[in-house]
Image (cartoon, rainbow, N blue to C red):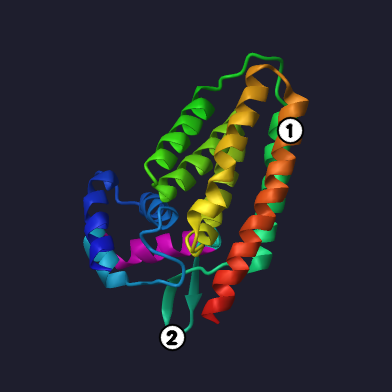
Amino acid sequence: MAEQLTGLADDRALLGRTSTAERVSDILRSRIADGYFPPGTRLSEDSIGGALGVSRNTLRESFRLLTHERLLVHELNRGVFVRVLTVEDVEDIYRTRALVECAVVRGLAEPPYALDGLAGAVEDGRRSAREGDWKAVSTANIHFHRELVALAGSERTDELMRSVFAELRLAFHVVDDPQRLHEPYIARNAEILEALETGERETAERLLAVYLENSLKRVVEVYLRRVGDER
C-alpha cells in the first residue's frame, strides 16, 4: 500500500485549487484501472485522504461516486474495497461493449475517418509486446477501443464507455497470464483499423463482433480459472 500511496501523493497536483470529489474520483478511477489498487484491496480513508490532501467528506463522496460506477463496494463494518467482478459482470460488460462499439462502427458516415488515435494505439500495442510489457499491451488495447468509441463524436457515449472499460480492467487485473489473454488482439485491432482505413465499415463491424465474442470466451475462461483457484 505504501507504494500506491506514494503514487497518489504525486497526483495531488492534479487537484489544483478545487479539490472536488469528481477530481478525486478521476484520480482513483485511473489508479484502479492501472492496477495500483487491485480487486479486493481495502481503501483506507486516512491514508488516501492524507496522500491526496483532501478532507474525509470529499473522499467519502468520491468513494460513493465510484461505488455507483461499480468500481468500489462498501462492506458494512469493514470499509470500502475495490470490487471483485463476477463472471456475470464480465458477460454483461461484453454485452454492453458489443451493443455500443458495433453500433458506433455501423453508424459511421462516409470515409475517410479520423483514425490517428486508433493507429497510435495499435503501434503502442505492438511496441509494448516487443518489450514484453503485457500490462502496457492491455492499456493499449483499451485505448484502441476508447478511440473507436470516440469516432461517434458523442461525449455521453464516451463517458458511458469510460466506466465500462474501467470496470473491464478489474477483470484483467486478476488474470494470471496476460500475454495469453492480450497478445492475439494486437493483430486483430490492426485488422479492424485496416478495414476502416479502406472504408469497409461492414467488414470492420463483422471483425469487431467476432473479436468481442472471442474475447469474452477467453476472458471468462482465464477469469474462472483464476477466481476458482482462489476460492
Quarter of image, res 41:
bottom left
> In the image, is 162 to the left or to the right of 209?
left
Measuring 47% from the left and 64% from the top, which residue is drawn there?
64
Tell me which amino acid carries mark 2: Asn
206 lies left or right of 38: right
Relative to 227, does residue 155 appear above or below in the rendering?
above
The mark found on residue 205 in the picture is 1
- CA–CA distance in space, label 2 to label 1: 47 Å
**Residue at left offset 39%, top offset 66%:** 60
Look at the magenta stretch and give its main secondary structure. Answer: helix
Q: Which residues are magenta?
A: 53-67
Q: Is 68 contained in the magenta span?
A: no
Question: Observer-nearest residue: 65 or 83?
Answer: 83
Residue 153: give x, y in percent of width and height.
Answer: 60, 28
Residue 211 % position (x, y): 68, 43
> Hey, which quadrant is residue 109 in on the image?
top right
Q: Tell me which corner region of the image, top left, top right, bottom left or bottom right, holds residue 201.
A: top right
Name the N-terminal-most of marks 2 and 1: 2
Residue of label 2: 77
Instruction: Identify whether 185 is placed above or below 66.
Output: above
The picture places residue 30, in percent across and down from the top left corner, at 40, 51
Q: Nearer the viewer, residue 4 or 194?
A: 194
Query: Mark 1: which amino acid?
Result: Glu
The quarter of the picture where the C terminus appears is: bottom right
